[in-house]
Amino acid sequence: MFDKRSEYSLSVISNDYSVSKSRFFSCFYEKKDRDEDEILADIFSKDRYDIIVPMSDGAVNYLSRNKNRIETGYSVKCAVPDYGAVSIVSDKGHFMRFCEDNGIPHPRTIAVTEGTLDKAAGYVGFPSLIKPDFSVGARGITKVNSLDELQLHYPEIKQKYGSCTLQEFIDNSDYYYNVMIYRDSQGRCDTYAIIKIVRMFPVGAGSSTCCISVENEELLSICKAALEKLEWHGMADFDVLQRKDTLEYRIIEINPRVPASMRAAYVSGVDFPETIILDTLGERSKCSQYLPGKTLRFLGTDLLWFLKSPRRFKTSPSWFRFIGRDIYYQDIFKSDPSTWYSWFISGLKKNMRNNHN
């Protein structure tokens, strides 16, 4: 439970191995195969909570759809944007059309069906990406270099994941940006952090294994404008690519939840959890002093990056730089030494699932 006058007490619902081993939580509830209503009924029959903060796409969609019912029935606040905005960004194809209609920079994208493959290829060109409208992480995203490859791969992706788009391939495997912004109930975007992800796993198209917090007014302005168009209220996590030829930015998606990269913001002076909690409770949090230039490594998966990447001896910052005033770790805490091992195992399992899918 959380008492805003004293301290936070945090309970977690998850099936994640690494989370179950953490010492930072007062209670751990294993989700297993139970549906959300069953889990919440079980938890709230035992204790009372003030706020629910979703950490996964599925949880965001469930809470946003049922926000009024849950808040009324359990006297708990759901820290989640309204379903109207969530439904736009959760459907990747819908979000790209929204960007097109509102002048938001995005990759050239078109909905694709069996009967429109030729037309879609003519509009987008090659290389391009087949992207499911609904998928987690990079599952189902397939690069195609010709109409023959598009015709070959599209049917199997459509059968497995449902509706898809064909999207311009932006060739920049060296880095991408993650822009975290909290837009409060008054439309203010005072709490933000921007990280440049310079190493990722799987190599070239995965989650961050090493990132650096940066300041970028142009990128921040683009993302704030998108949230204003969406009439957003809550946490937003943007993934943004930059073209190598023109250096133009392209928003590829918004995750309507607290991201795993939140620790990069925290070591840079930005406390998103406090902002989320206080705004959800109707209070105004103090402005964070954003201090960019911090490096955050996820050592468990950074080891995997080193084993797989041809750039292992050319990366900047150097992979061998482990200690420094501005170097922090996602998976190492002095107060909880079990975290590195559990995060490493979790990363291996995630990689095995991605390879399987």
Image (cartoon, rainbow, N blue to C red):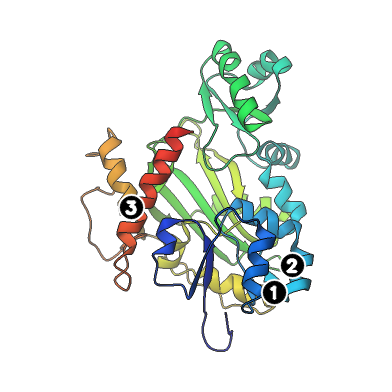
Check whether the beta carbons of the residues at disc 2 and disc 1 lie within 8 A of each other.
yes
Amino acid under disc 2 = Ile
Q: Quadrant of residue 258?
A: bottom right
Task: Identify residue for label 1.
Answer: 76
First reached walking from the N terminus: tag 2 or tag 1: 2
Residue drawn at the location 67% of the way across and 62% of the way down: 38
On residue 70, the disc is 2
Task: Name the secondary structure under disc 2.
Answer: helix
First reached walking from the N terminus: tag 3 or tag 1: 1
Along the line of sight, which residue is nearer the eye, 74 or 146?
74
Q: Quadrant of residue 150?
A: top right
Amino acid under disc 1 = Val
Q: CA distance from mark 3 to mark 1?
A: 34 Å
Task: Identify residue for label 3.
Answer: 344
What crowding class fits label 2: few (fewer than 14 Cα within 10 Å), some (14-19), or many (20 or more)? some
Amino acid under disc 3 = Phe
Q: Is residue 277 above or below residue 214?
A: below
Task: Name the secondary structure under disc 3.
Answer: helix
Q: Is residue 341 above or below residue 164?
A: below
